[in-house]
Image: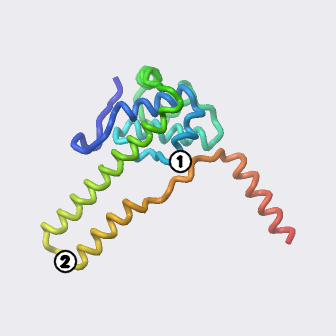
Amino acid sequence: MADTAVYDANLPFNIDAEQIVLGSVIADPELLSKVSDRLTPEHFHIKMHSGIYSIIQILFVSGQEINIVTVTESCVRKGVFESQDTARTYLFKLTDFTIEKSSIETYANTLCEKYLMRQLILASKDIYDLAIAGTEEPNHLLDYAEKKIYDIRNEKDIKGLTHIGPVVKQTLVDLAYINQH
């Protein structure tokens, strides 16, 4: 079976939610539009799942079809899986986890919440390590801690994914307009 190693098993994550989101999007690529505005590959704690989601995004943005065949081929090419058989077996297993279309946002929210908790834990550990080391002035450490928490709270909004074709076409139209004036 595929390697499901996690970055750190002690950090919060929900493997079921990760599998459901991925399986649902592979089975019904239209569901990507319901989660792409809030999920990035980093929201998936399991490295393999992060890689799969990244590939799904790349396929979507480049205007390619999202299905078992294209995701399998891309996953093997990008090294997410070692072989076609391993990739195909795991991706078919993921599609068993599909849910009702209306529920995918609930699972995406779960991934966002777990990601936020991981970010807070990692920031806290970083701040703790600096405080224990005693190499920072207290006011500098406070500024650093405030910035870390501020950055987590104000993480950039994800705008969602857009097919590259219309973007390129609009850019060319805009450039032509600018050159005429």
Say which residue appears at 46% left-offset and 36% top-offset. Answer: 52
C-alpha separation, residue under disc 1 versus residue under disc 2: 38 Å
Q: Earlier in the sequence, mark 1 or mark 2?
A: 1
Q: Is residue 46 left or right of residue 91?
A: left
For label 1, the residue is 37
Say which residue appears at 51% left-offset and 38% top-offset. Answer: 55
Which class describes the residues within 10 Å of circle 1: few (<14), some (14-19), or many (20+)? few
Q: Could you tell me residue 31's position as x and y percent?
A: 56, 34
Q: Is residue 123 left or right of residue 174?
A: left
Q: Dividing the picture into quarters, in which one does residue 173 lie?
A: bottom right
Q: Could you tell me residue 24's position as x and y percent?
A: 50, 29
Query: Are circles 1 and 2 on residues that touch, CB within 8 Å?
Result: no
Vertical order, 44 against 134 (above or below)? above
Q: Is residue 144 left or right of residue 154?
A: left
The reply to whether residue 102 is visible in this rendering is yes
The reply to whether residue 73 is visible in this rendering is no
For label 2, the residue is 138
Instruction: Depth check: give the residue in front, 107 or 53.
Output: 107
User: What type is the residue that disc 2 sits on?
Assistant: Pro
Vertical order, 62 against 99 (above or below)? below
* Dot label at residue 170: none
Dot 1: element? loop
Q: Could you tell me residue 88's position as x and y percent?
A: 46, 22
